[in-house]
Image (cartoon, rainbow, N blue to C red):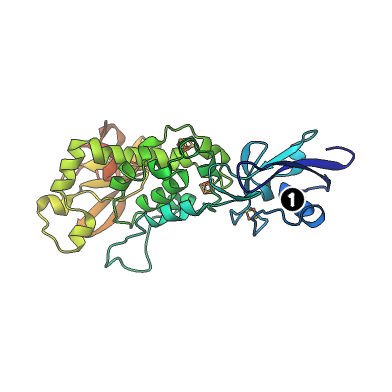
Amino acid sequence: MKNGSIVLQVFRGEDSAGQEVRFEVPAVEGMVVLDAIHYIQANHANDLACRWNCKAAKCGSCSAEINGQPRLMCKTRVDEYPDQEIHVWPMRTFPLIKDLVTDVSWNYEVNKQIPGFTPRPNEPVPYRMLPEDTERVYEYRKCIECFLCQDVCHVLRNHDDKSLYYGPRYMVRIAGLELHPLDTERRTGLLHGKAGVGMCNITKCCQEVCPEHIKITDNAIIPLKERTTTDVYDPVAWIGRKLRPRRDELAAGQPTGALGTVRAPQRFAVKDVIRLKSGDRPMARVGTVLPDGRLEIWVLKMKGTQQHWKGPKTIDASDVINNYGPLDEVGIGSKLVEQYISEDHAH
Ligand code: SF4
Ligand code: SF4
Ligand code: FES
C-alpha cells in the first residue's frame, strides 16, 4: 500500500504471450481483490475479463492466483498484502480464455463420467439415515466447485495430459457418493482406472487451498484409496464379495443363501462396529463406554433384506479383542472388531 493506494499487477492477454499490467487503485477499508479488479474495470480497463457472481465466496467463480496462491478474489482482502504489490493471475492449470478467465469445461466433462447417487430401487422415501452418516456426507457437499484444488494439484498442473487423474474436486464428489449409506453403486473400478486415485501422492496442497475447508485428502482421498486397494488388491475381500451378494442384489430378489442373509451391511458409516460371533446377531454398533468399563451396543437385526439396530444393551469391554477386520465391510474408516459374545453379556 502506497499513499492510500494499492498496486496491482494484473495478467492481461489471451495466450502465453500475455503479461502483467500495473494498476494503482485507491485503498478502501475492508477491500478485497475483487473490489480492486472492479475498480480497474470501471476506471482503467473496461475490457479486463474476470469471472465472478456472488462476491460472497459461495459461487466459486472468481478463482485466481494471487501472489502465486490459488485464492478466491472475493475472499482475499488487500490488507493481507501490506507493503506488497498484488499480482493477480488466472488459474494456470486450465487453458486461458482472456485475462483472468480460464476454460474450466474439462471439469464438467469429468463430472459427467461419475455414476450418480444410486439408491436401491425400492428404498423407502423420505430417506432415513443415521445423523452421523448425514454429517459425514455433508462435508463433501460443501464444495462450491471453485476448482482451486484442481488448480494447485501438481498431477493436473504438471501434466499436459489430464487423462491420468480426475483431480481432488472429483475425489470429493466420489467420496460423497461412496460414503452415502444409501448408495449402492461401487466406483472403485473407476477410481482405480480412469479416475486415477493412485496418482495422488497425498501432498495435501489441495486441502490447504480449499475455501470451504473440506479435508480433501484426509476425508476423501485417503478413504477412497483404502477402499480401492481393498477392492482391487485384497483377494480375501474379493472372495468375500463373490460369496456375499450385495444389498441391492438381495433387494432385487437374487438367491440368498445362509451367507447372504447374515452378511454385514455394505454402508454403515458408523464410528465403531463390532462383529458378534453368536446367534443371529452378526454385527453391533458401539455406543457409549460406561464408567464401569462396559460398552453400550446396538445390535443389528437382520430380517431378509430389512435391517435395524436394536439397543442399547451392555457388554463387557474386556471381551473385545483387537482384531480389526476388512474396513470395507462397514464403511470407510469404521473399525471392525471381532468379538466373542455370549448371551450372558448382552443384557
Ligand atoms: S493431495 Fe493429491 S489431489 Fe491433493 S494436490 Fe496433492 S496430489 Fe493433488
Ligand atoms: S473441494 Fe474445495 S477447493 Fe476443490 S472445488 Fe470444492 S470448494 Fe473448491
Ligand atoms: S464471486 Fe462467488 S466465490 Fe467469489
Q: Position of residue 341 (x, y in %)?
A: 20, 40
Amino acid type for the residue under numbered disc 1: Ile
In the depicted view, which residue is nearer to us: 291 or 103?
103
Q: Which residue is depicted at the point 22% across and 48% down?
A: 264
The answer to whether 50 appears left or right of 307 in the picture is right
**Beta carbon at label 1 within 8 Å of ligand 3:** no
Q: Position of residue 323 (x, y in %)?
A: 25, 32
Asked whether the viewer can see residue 333, the reply is: no
- SS at badge 1: helix
Q: Position of residue 126 (x, y in %)?
A: 38, 68
Q: Which residue is depicted at the point 74% across and 39% down?
A: 86
Asked whether the viewer can see residue 192, the reply is: yes
So how many labels did they put on this image? 1
Q: Which residue is depicted at the point 35% across and 69% down?
A: 125
The answer to whether 308 appears left or right of 288 in the picture is left
In the depicted view, which residue is nearer to us: 293 or 100?
100
In the depicted view, which residue is nearer to us: 307 or 196?
196
Where is the N terminus found, in terms of image quarters? top right
The residue pinned by badge 1 equals 37
The answer to whether 325 appears left or right of 155 in the picture is left
In the figure, residue 229 lies in which quadrant?
A: top left
Q: Which residue is depicted at the point 24% across and 46% down?
A: 283
Q: Residues within 10 Å of mark 1 (few under 14, many from 20)?
A: many
